[in-house]
Image: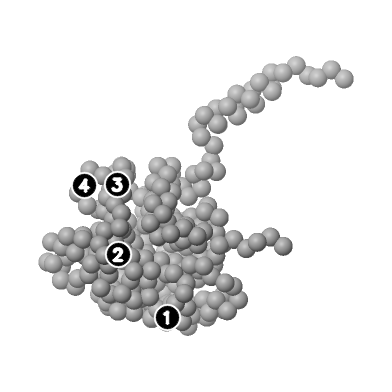
Amino acid sequence: MNPTPPTVLVFAANDPSGGAGLMADVLTLASLGCHTLPIITAITVQDSAGVQEFHAVDSEIVDEQARFILEDIKIDVIKVGMVGSVENLAVIAEIASDYPDIPLILEPVFSMGRGEELSNEELISAMRELLLPHTHLVTPNNTEARLLASDDPDEQEEMPLDAAAQRILECGCEYVLIAGTHEKTPKVVNTLYSRLGRVRTDQWPRLPGSYHGAGATLASAIAGALANGAEIGDAVKDAQDFTSQALSAAFRPGMGQFVPDRMFWARPTDEEATAEIEAAIRKELEPPTQS
């Protein structure tokens, strides 16, 4: 019997465009050698340009999906994306409380890349009170970090990211990785914080265009690295490397945003494709073998 790959239990919404949500998680984790166990929290109606609507799955069904798997399979890491409702969030928090030894990676999904709102103040408040105390690492971008840190819009606008990180950590999570994707800086600056302050800071080129699923890719890559045995600092660095390569290889399947290519390593490079074409042409030009 072959050994079981590292396992990651994922709570997320289904995105039929394949850009974000469960598909982003499954592709990222598979690319990193993990076996994904997907728990559907919501169904979205969307395309590559944006979300039209979403429908949360009943919380009892979310609970049953997860608990049947948890009783059957040893889980290495839990990754949480869009939860869909406060009721679903409460269910996930209770599951996390029942399995405290499994590290939980939280990607706080409050809106889509084009700004469509997928949450409200009640859900954000519930995330602070119920889920963050059971979270190993939360991965907000700069906008989400300020929303998690404060209910006051005026305070959010002026809050430094270091202060936002410490506010979030006070809610009970162990680490915060803030991605500076929407800051007005020449490069994207990502910073990992613990309760002792900054752990590491990384800078990445600010790519042109708009991307769908970058946050899911980063959070799932961290989950995958942790499932493979990496320490938190190395997991964050490796996941950023992976996400950067996936974004650099992004493609545009429809009329909307670009999608990170989580299987970039499996595609032939231009040089490889050219070499394959040249080899095929040479083979066609070879004289037939004499029998």
The alpha-carbon separation of the residues under discs 4 and 1 comes to 38 Å
The secondary element bearing badge 2 is classed as strand
Is residue 66 shown above or below 82?
A: below
User: Image point 66% across, 21% down: which residue?
Assistant: 282
Dot in front, 4 or 2? 2
Under mark 1, the amino acid is Ser
The quarter of the displayed image where residue 159 is located: bottom left
Q: Is the N terminus in the top left, top right, bottom left or bottom right quadrant?
A: bottom right
Q: Is residue 68 left or right of residue 245?
A: right
- Element type where label 4 sits in the image: loop
Q: Which structural element holds mark 1?
A: helix
Under mark 4, the amino acid is Thr
Tell me the residue that label 4 is attached to. 185
110 lies left or right of 23: left
Q: Which residue is mark 3?
A: 203
Pointer 4 local density, CA inside 10 Å: few below 14, some 14–19, many at least 20: few
Task: Give the residue number, with chain letter if any, for mark 1.
Answer: 97
Q: Who comes first in sequence, dot 4 or dot 2?
A: 4
Lower sequence index among marks 2 and 1: 1
Which residue lies at the image location 55% right of the left edge and 59% below the top edge? 34
Label 3, secondary structure: give it: strand
Residue at which label 2 appears: 194
Q: CA distance from mark 3 to mark 2?
A: 18 Å
Task: Say which label, 3 or 4, has the lower sequence index.
Answer: 4
Q: Residue furthest front?
A: 196
Task: Compare marks 1 and 3 and give the one earlier in the sequence.
Answer: 1
C-beta proximity under 8 Å, tags 3 and 2: no
Task: Look at the image and tell me whether residue 41 can be seen.
Answer: yes
Give residue 60's position: percent from left, percent from top.
47, 83
Residue at mark 3 to residue at mark 4: CA–CA distance = 10 Å
